[in-house]
Image (cartoon, rainbow, N blue to C red):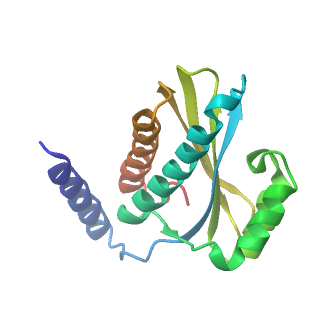
């Protein structure tokens, strides 16, 4: 069965579940994704450029997939880029900084804020992580992680695709998942 048929089947199941429960399909909540960061146990300067490109690549992939699946409505960060840059420059890693995420949540005007990171243990072992915070309360709504084998574009993309697919499947079964 090809990917399009599987995707249509999942959408149909989600629609039927909503209809059976009398739930109206609402617009997805907004999500300000502030990007992915790299945490390396053994930094290799010769790979910096390619890994920074991969971080941007999976950020774009994540944004596109969450919008395509109707999980969240990605927020354009351009109007608030100064705030994002200020917060990013105030901490080595935003994902480790509780007040940084709160500052972003308060200033970006979205329902949720997400930060992602890739932990690179070696060129063979990596994991991709995402944390989604509810802006109004500061509550962590969702944390996900997926392990990768191989440090290449396809393994990074595959990790993000799996993560978003899993989020969508769990949301179809539990409409409050990740909210």
Number of numbered markers = 0
Q: Is residue 53 left or right of residue 27?
A: right
Q: Position of residue 116 (x, y in %)?
A: 62, 48
- Residue 175 visible in the snapshot: no
The relative height of residue 87 versus residue 48 in the rendered view (above or below) is: below
Q: Residue at horizontal 72%, vertical 27%?
A: 43
The relative height of residue 93 versus residue 16 in the rendered view (above or below) is: above
Q: Quadrant of the N terminus?
A: top left
Q: Residue furthest front?
A: 46
The relative height of residue 179 versus residue 24 in the rendered view (above or below) is: above
Q: Residue at horizontal 36%, vertical 63%?
A: 68
- Residue 44 visible in the snapshot: yes
Q: Is residue 107 left or right of residue 123?
A: right
Q: Nearer the viewer, residue 66 or 41?
A: 41
Q: Residue at horizontal 47%, vertical 24%?
A: 150
Q: Position of residue 82 (x, y in %)?
A: 77, 72
Q: Position of residue 86 (x, y in %)?
A: 83, 65
Q: Residue at horizontal 26%, vertical 65%?
A: 15
Q: Position of residue 154 (x, y in %)?
A: 39, 36
Residue 179, image quadrant = bottom right
The relative height of residue 63 versus residue 164 in the rendered view (above or below) is: below
């Amino acid at each position: 069965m090809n990917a399009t048929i599987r995707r249509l089947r999942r959408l149909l199941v989600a629609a039927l579940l909503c209809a059976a429960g009398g739930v109206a399909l609402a617009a997805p909540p907004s999500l300000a994704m502030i990007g992915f960061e790299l945490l390396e146990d053994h930094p290799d300067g010769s790979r910096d450029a390619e890994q920074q490109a991969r971080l941007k690549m999976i950020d774009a992939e994540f944004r596109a997939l969450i919008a395509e699946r109707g999980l969240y409505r990605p927020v354009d960060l351009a109007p608030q880029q100064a705030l994002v840059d200020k917060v990013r420059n105030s901490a080595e890693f935003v994902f480790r900084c509780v007040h940084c995420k709160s500052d972003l949540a308060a200033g970006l005007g979205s329902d949720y804020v997400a930060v992602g990171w890739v932990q690179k243990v070696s060129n063979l072992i990596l994991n991709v992580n995402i944390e989604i915070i509810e802006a109004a309360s500061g509550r962590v709504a969702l944390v996900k992680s997926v392990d990768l084998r191989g440090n290449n574009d396809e393994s990074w993309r595959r990790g993000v695709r799996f993560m978003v697919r899993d989020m969508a499947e769990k949301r179809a079964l539990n409409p409050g998942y990740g909210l």
